Amino acid sequence: MKNKFIKSIMMIFTLFILISYIPVQAANVAPGGSFSVTLACGSIEGSVRFDASNATITGGTGDSWCDRNKTFTITATAGSQGTATISMVGVDATNVSDLSDYSGKTINSSSVSVVANSTPSGNTGGGSGSGSSSSSGSGSSATTPVVDNRSSNNNLASLSISEGQLSPAFSSDVTEYSVELASSVSSITVNASASDSKASVSGTGEISLNAGDNRIEITVTAENGNPKLYVINAYVDETPLIYVPYGNDELGVVRNLSAVQLDGFEETTVQIDGNEVKAWRSPARNITVVYLQKDDEKNFYIYDETKGVTSIYRQVALLGNTLGLVDIPEELQERAGMVYQELTIDDVTLMGWVYEDKSFSNYSLIYAMDDMGEYRYYQYESTQNTLQLYSGAAAVTQEDYENLVNQNASMQLYFYIALGGCVVLLLTTIYGLVSVSRYKKRLLSKGNEINDMNKAD
């Protein structure tokens, strides 16, 4: 009797498992319609997530932990025509029947057919899921899908612009166009109409343009809310319209300044030939700069509304120093014992000086503006890769040092020779005086003797 009871229980359990795997016909739902599915964990335990294909999950995913035979009811909104599928995927999950890892694997899924103007045909299933396959379920907990009869037409019937020619020619199936415009064009008017009178169009009308590349977006939204994007890539010729003289050159005012900025400077404007031009001002440096171009090369230039352009200004970070590289006046380019040439320091190319003496090839000199607006000389030493203020003292070469030492030695020799001559002369003089004095004494003595002899006679 006991055995029969156990066999009956086992048969009922087996029948339950078999029934759980019998798929049922999926329900039909219109695009944008709401539907629900019930997914079972089966023999899976652990954390899971729910993925949607051609659908958007709107409810039922607050709990994401599977216990054996637990079920989840998921509500979603269908996408476009085709099939919408909701899947349960393991995140950190295990099949407790064989202890296999189900992380990243699909545990269960359920699908509905998305058909325009459809009539519901059955209920979405409650997949049982066992960790070994995906199936449509056999539950009957689905909500009745909503039929959406709104139009999905989001095409344009026409697209035109007031300046230039669209390329390629307009077609409702082509969503991206380009147009090239003259440098004098600052705006265009975009006109567009939808194929469906119930659709709406945005992004038309007068559009302001900058020099260079401009992206114009026109969006068509169908009655059912589905959007479609059309794009016009408009390029405005960047050739300058305002020029300013500098030396023998004519520098053009750059018109496309959308990505131009300068640290430590604030935006301002200056007047050039009666035109207001964007500029940048540094109170600390007491300079104003404008962004100009010579041919295709663009740089900042120091600008004075009285004097015009006075120098280029290239702000660089050089070995921990923020310096402004400027044009070096011709009268400063000649330096005794040095050669004026192009240098590369810390990957920055600039003009400066090197020593003619090859024994000082690791030294060079540059001229730049510091962050307080002072023009200074800096000395660079390449072996230690250091930059410091230049004291103004020229380096002394080994040859110069040796010449100086030899010159000093010669001067010392001349000094001692002269001193020796003076001593000899002095001694000679003293000796002469002594000799004369003695001679005089002998003469005097001899004269006295003669006098005495005469007296005796």
Image: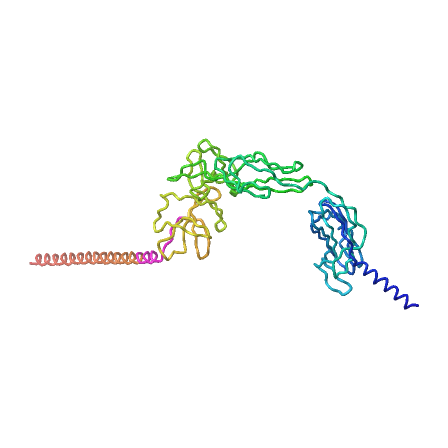
Instruction: Please tell me which residue lies in front, 260 or 377.
Output: 260
- In the displayed orientation, state which residue is furthest to the right: 1
On whether residue 89 falls in the magenta region, the answer is no
Image quadrant where residue 129 sits: bottom right
The answer to whether 67 is drawn above or below residue 115 in the figure is below
For residue 3, side relative to residue 176 (left or right): right
Instruction: Please tell me which residue lies in front, 128 or 171.
Output: 171
Instruction: Please tell me which residue lies in front, 196 or 417.
Output: 196
- Label tally: 0
On whether residue 397 falls in the magenta region, the answer is yes
Instruction: Please tell me which residue lies in front, 451 or 446.
Output: 446
The x and y percentages for residue 213 are 52, 42
Q: How is the image coloured?
A: rainbow
Q: Could you tell me which quadrant the C terminus lies in?
A: bottom left
- In the displayed orientation, state which residue is furthest to the top: 274
The x and y percentages for residue 78 are 72, 47
Q: Is residue 257 visible?
A: no
- Residues in magenta, as a range: 392-407
Q: Is residue 121 visible?
A: yes
The x and y percentages for residue 245 are 40, 37
The x and y percentages for residue 108 are 75, 57
By secondary structure, the bulk of the magenta-drawn segment is best described as helix
